[in-house]
Image (cartoon, rainbow, N blue to C red):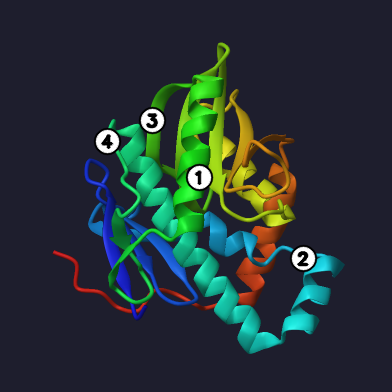
Amino acid sequence: MKKEIKIVNKERKVLQVTTSDERWYIREGLNKDTGLPEYEYVPSVTWICEHYPKGIAFYKWLANKGWDEAEALKVAAGDKGSKIHQAVGLLLDGQEIAINAAFLNHTTGEVEELSFEEYGAVLSFADWYKTCKPTIINKDFMVWGDGYAGMIDLLCQIDGQLYIVDFKTSQYIWPSHELQLSAYKHASESINSRIAILQLGYHLNKKKYKFTEIDDQYQEFMAAKLIWAKEQKNVSPSRLNIP
């Protein structure tokens, strides 16, 4: 991936710009002093969360795999998660997903059929949906917070309670995942909602999914944001010609 630019909110004129190691959200606004149009850009929630300490378990895994293999696994996991997410989005739109359904691999730019494992993860979402019977309020929508922005996978009601839900295909929940949801909660108009992670294709139980409610850790997220600001000092998006 060299650079991917897409519109994530037409009404608010917000763009998402992604490269291999950066992700920015850019929106059109007015300069407070001059009143002239200008572009405001902020880092993504996920990019900020990458700067939070990952813990000893991660560094042991990294030492065991080595940098190159770890990066390859990270890219492969991201591509897998992206295809599953695309399929789940179509399910929520009422479409059927066949076992030979194909989706875009953002790294290669090629359209690929779902693997057996990926299709199993999609089926696990369908099973969760049938069991929990969520009322869907919104999906795949952008929120803009205090100096950051991100995309919420799902806003729904379960048993009368409002939830912000993030889909994961990893077998473990890392601290960065918890901070990510906390940031979404405080950027969303649904500040009183609960936050939860739905792991799809989960291998450690018979259901093949796991729904985990997360405690609010917004202060920890803002600490990670300070680390991000120090590490990425003077970093800004490359110049763009935006019509």
Q: Earlier in the sequence, mark 3 or mark 4?
A: 4
Pick the residue in front: 206 or 128. Answer: 206
Element assignment for label 1:
loop
Residue 86: image location, x then y, percent: 36, 50
At horizontal 25% and vertical 74% (from top left) the residue drawn is 240
Label number found at residue 95: 4
Distance from Cα at disc 2 to Cα at disc 1: 22 Å
Q: Is residue 188 above or below residue 12?
A: above
Q: With 65 as the anchor, is 6 left or right in this view?
A: left
Corner quadrant of residue 218: top right
Check disc 3: other Cα within 10 Å, few if <14, some if 14-19, many if 20+.
Answer: few
Return the residue at label 2. Answer: 53
Return the residue at label 1. Answer: 145
Q: Earlier in the sequence, mark 2 or mark 4?
A: 2
Element assignment for label 4:
loop
Distance from Cα at disc 1 to Cα at disc 4: 32 Å
Residue 26: image location, x then y, percent: 34, 59
Label number found at residue 138: 3
Q: Amino acid at mark 4?
A: Gln
